[in-house]
Image: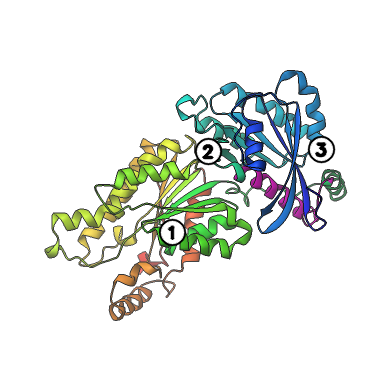
Amino acid sequence: MSRMPNHREYHIVVLGSGGVGKSCLTAQFVQGIWIERYDPTIEDSYRKQCDVDGRQVILEILDTAGTEQFTAMRELYMKSGQGFLLVFSITSSSSLKELSELRDQLVNLKDDPHVPIVLVGNKSDLEEDRAVSRAAAFAVSSGWGNVPYYEASARTRQNVTEVFVDVCRQIMHKDLQNGKGGGGHGGEERSRRRRDDDGGEDQNKYGNKLQGQRVLIIGGSAGIGYGVAEASLENGAHVTISSSNESRVQEAVSRLQKAYPSAAQRVEGYAANMGEQASLESNVEQLFKKAGSLNHVVFTAGDSLAMMPLEEATMDKTIQAGMVRFFAPLMVAKHAAKVLDKSPTSSITLTTGNVSEKPIPNWSVINGFATALQGSTRGLALDLKPIRVNLVSPGAVITPLWDGIPKEQREQMFKSFASKMATGKMGQVEDVAEAFLYAMKDKNLTGSMISTNGGAMLM
């Protein structure tokens, strides 16, 4: 492929032990082929034009040797690269351990603790042969400054494109930080001169806590969940949204991609019905299989807020009223614990309503489930520790969830809610979403309820 004058070029190096599938991963990305037979690589280079966040770029990819006799060549590879895929096999614990030395060598050679790196656990299709737990891999990722971690399969193409796009995105972001506007190869020396001239780079302790994190938002196609998806994308996370309706999920994914074109490849969605008792647990289990590796799970799903006075309650109606409000969050927590890293860096955030603190007349059933979820959150924080489990309790927030109530009655309720708030206004999604970000970011927060209710509890 000839060099395109208007396309920026980036140099990516694929590093890792022999036999972890570096060549298979690269060939699948560049050529779309699966290499069945293992043939040790000395050095292969590829060029591929692709779209990254709406920009056409050319990736110069160097697939390196993993066997010991070629380790002397690694320093040359590292000097030439701008971004790096550090690949291990989930079937080999030693292949992960060897990457720590490579990463340290990279940081020292580049004189930069923020070298663009993606950690890749390859051969995710061999789950039955897994020797490296997700928790162990996430621990390494966290120790390296929360570098993005993906589990990939060259055979099935899972996350193959994503890992190359992610490291390219990091290079582009670094170029923008260094004032080069996404320039090409050779930026390391200019970056080093810039740091020497201005006395160093600003620290970043608070602004990037969700950068590269993977967030699943159940109920993310509308309302508060959609707002959490927007906020997560703006904070650099990879977002998977889910709701019960496939067309609504895909429409929401499309809206997010249009609203955040530079993050379009960080959004995906899957349908999963949380409202049917017979299929609830299997739906939850399948959703987590589709979502893959995760750092955070947010549950904001809801259903129509139909009034149900106690005298109209039956067992069937009562159980159905609790499916999304209580039973589904429990099943989500159960299966989330199987895929999340067993660490305070992982979180599950559930959603209730402030009726658990201030009941509404004729909502005894709904009030009860809201209160039950508050108690279960504290129990889950103990049962699933050190994974963090928290609860957000929004007050009255303007969302499509109220659409099931007749318009005239709804407007009267809105006026009544606003009059009982210290702020004088109902909540807005973009404000309430901040509570969920806090629950994900604060590694010291667990077993707690965050109330965002406009001061309604004071009135």
Bounds of the magenta segment: 162-186
Q: Which residue is mark 3?
A: 80
Assess whether mark 3 and mark 2 are in contact (beta carbons under 8 angstroms). Answer: no
Give amino acid for label 2.
Thr
User: Is the residue marked by circle 2 packed among few (<14), some (14-19), or many (20+) residues within 10 Å?
Assistant: few
**Which numbered disc flags the more N-terminal residue, 2 or 1?**
2
Q: Position of residue 353 (x, y in %)?
A: 34, 60
Q: Please indicate, yes or no, whether residue 235 appears anywhere in the rendered image.
A: no
Report the amino acid beneath label 3: Ser
User: Magenta part mainly helix, strand or loop?
Assistant: helix
Count of numbered labels shown in the rendering: 3
Mark 2–mark 3 distance (CA, rounded to whole Å): 30 Å
Between 7 and 301, the one lying in front of the other is: 7
Q: Is residue 401 left or right of residue 20?
A: left
Q: Is residue 380 left or right of residue 33?
A: left
Please, is residue 235 above or below residue 222 in the view? Answer: above
Q: Is residue 82 left or right of residue 28?
A: right
Q: Are marks 3 and 1 in contact (CB under 8 Å)?
A: no
Residue 249 shows which numbered tag? 1
Residue 35 coordinates in the image, percent (x, y): 61, 31
Colour mapping used in the image: rainbow
Residue positioned 29% across, 54% down in the render: 275
